[in-house]
């Protein structure tokens, strides 16, 4: 694709915080310093952030991060920078699938997805990766939604096609993903991301779709569950006790950030979506989010108007599902947007992302211990 004003990449940022993964991820239960006696008065602060080995094949943003099992995570799709023949930086949408072993701390390369997609809609069920659309590069200055869907089996390292998303559901990327029992839910998303202004504004949608991984078919949700209370893309998502939460996100543009929490009881779909009372302290889109012990942790984001922020948020804020309330936590060490977080054994892993609004992908990989 053509270099664009939207994806302005400064390669000087690529080398930021790449200390070569010498620190070890602390175990919350056994490895962190204990607070006892006099030490407690001095408010010993637990080190929450750990730097991990950078993404092996280089910077990446607008990908998805997946927990394949308790020892491997996967990074799928997104945008990678490359140097053109005239020595400028351009960006490519990729189908690359990379795996990271939490034990050996090494990156591996797996079979790429059959289609190069950024903002992919993906989730893992029974160890298999479902890629249910995303945005593709039309090579005309726009990223439209792809309805094409696939499943990846890590045992054979093979991808297989699945039925397309039904046309009535609007092909899109950047949907909030929820997994419950054998069903994968896609809430909202974006049907067109214009790089060239002639394509107008970013097209956010309120559509909710569902894929049955047992039958291998898309299913039609009851009317009440089929539409979000508002259009959202680049939102956070989590399923807890059978309830699907969609947190924050934005509506037709990076700066149109939203702080709402939408919830849908997946056991009572006919009750429809509700808007929770608890609002994000800092409304943000382009966030990454992961659930640990009843709290959804949300990281960073895009569309920050604050001077000196490069348009990127550094906030870490946690939503307590039972309390319907938010807590502000220590900020990101390396603020990013356009990344994707995953929780494995109560640690949250956050590979890649962008360090400036629009572009500037990095290979930074860190983990957060709640
Ligand atoms: C560099 O090459 C790309 C195509 O690879 C082109 O789109 C761009 O305009 C070129 N930039 C300059 C400064 O020549
Ligand atoms: C390409 O750009 C880099 C960084 O600006 C510079 O160090 C390098 O010399 C350039 N290479 C060529 C062949 O122009
Ligand atoms: C860009 O992506 C396409 C599709 O995945 C691939 O065929 C091509 O080799 C990539 N180009 C670069 C420079 O990475
Ligand atoms: C986890 O997934 C990796 C990558 O597919 C695989 O090699 C490994 O055997 C799996 N481990 C377990 C315990 O299932
Ligand atoms: C999913 O598919 C299976 C197998 O066809 C079926 O038994 C089940 O009822 C479906 N679930 C939903 C929620 O449609």
Image (tube, grey):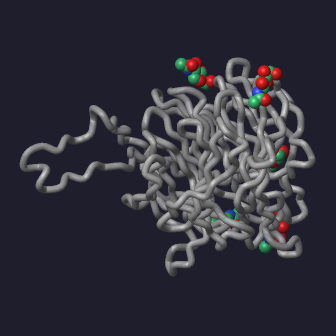
Q: Is residue 190 left or right of residue 13?
A: right
Nearer the observer, 263 or 183: 263
Residue 55: percent from left, percent from top: 57, 44
Position of residue 322 relative to residue 98, above or below, is below
Taking the spot 56% from the left edge, 26% from the top edge, the residue there is: 69
Total numbered labels placed on residues in the image = 0
Residue 370: percent from left, percent from top: 38, 46
Taking the spot 43% from the left edge, 37% from the top edge, the residue there is: 346
Q: Is residue 260 left or right of residue 251?
A: left
Q: Is residue 219 left or right of residue 323?
A: right
Position of residue 316 relative to residue 116, above or below, is below
Q: Is residue 102 visible?
A: yes
Task: Tell me which corner region of the image, top left, top right, bottom left or bottom right, holds residue 64.
Answer: top right
Residue 236: percent from left, percent from top: 60, 52
| Residue that lies at the very extreme toward the right in this rendered image | 167
Taking the spot 17% from the left edge, 44% from the top edge, the residue there is: 35
Nearer the observer, 207 or 264: 264
Nearer the observer, 218 or 337: 218
Residue 70: percent from left, percent from top: 51, 27
Q: Quadrant of ligand 5?
A: top right
| Residue that lies at the very extreme toward the left in this rendered image | 38
Q: Quadrant of the N terminus?
A: bottom right
Taking the spot 38% from the left edge, 38% from the top edge, the residue there is: 25
| Residue that lies at the very extreme toward the bottom in this rendered image | 307
| Residue that lies at the very extreme toward the top in this rendered image | 155
Q: Is residue 151 visible?
A: no
């Amino acid at each position: 694709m053509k270099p664009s004003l939207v994806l302005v990449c400064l390669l000087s940022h690529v080398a930021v915080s790449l200390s070569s993964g010498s620190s070890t991820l602390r175990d919350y239960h056994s490895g962190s310093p204990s607070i006892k006696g006099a030490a407690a008065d001095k408010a010993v602060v637990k080190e929450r952030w750990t730097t991990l080995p950078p993404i092996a094949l280089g910077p990446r943003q607008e990908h998805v991060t997946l927990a394949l099992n308790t020892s491997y995570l996967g990074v799928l799709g997104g945008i990678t920078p490359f140097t053109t023949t005239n020595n400028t930086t351009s960006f490519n949408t990729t189908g690359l699938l990379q795996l990271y072993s939490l034990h050996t701390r090494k990156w591996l390369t797996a079979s790429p997805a059959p289609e190069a997609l950024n903002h992919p809609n993906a989730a893992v069920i029974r160890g298999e990766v479902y890629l249910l659309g995303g945005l593709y590069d039309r090579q005309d200055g726009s990223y439209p939604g792809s309805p094409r869907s696939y499943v990846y089996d890590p045992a054979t390292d093979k991808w297989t096609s699945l039925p397309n998303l039904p046309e009535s559901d609007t092909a899109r990327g950047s949907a909030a993903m929820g997994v419950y029992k054998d069903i994968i839910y896609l809430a909202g998303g974006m049907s067109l991301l214009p790089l060239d202004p002639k394509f107008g504004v970013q097209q956010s949608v309120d559509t909710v779709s569902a894929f049955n991984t047992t039958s291998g078919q898309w299913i039609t949700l009851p009317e009440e569950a089929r539409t979000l209370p508002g259009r959202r893309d680049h939102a956070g998502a989590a399923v807890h006790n059978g309830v699907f939460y969609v947190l924050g996100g934005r509506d037709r543009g990076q700066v149109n950030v939203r702080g709402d929490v939408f919830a849908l009881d997946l056991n009572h779909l006919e009750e429809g979506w509700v808007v929770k009372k608890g609002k994000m302290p800092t409304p943000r889109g382009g966030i990454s989010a992961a659930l640990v012990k009843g709290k959804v942790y949300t990281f960073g984001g895009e569309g920050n108007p604050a001077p000196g922020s490069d348009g990127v948020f550094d906030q870490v804020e946690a939503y307590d599902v039972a309390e319907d309330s938010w807590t502000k936590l220590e900020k990101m060490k390396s603020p990013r947007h356009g990344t994707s977080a995953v929780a494995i054994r109560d640690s949250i892993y956050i590979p890649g992302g962008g360090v400036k609004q629009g572009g500037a992908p990095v290979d930074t990989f860190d983990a957060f211990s709640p």
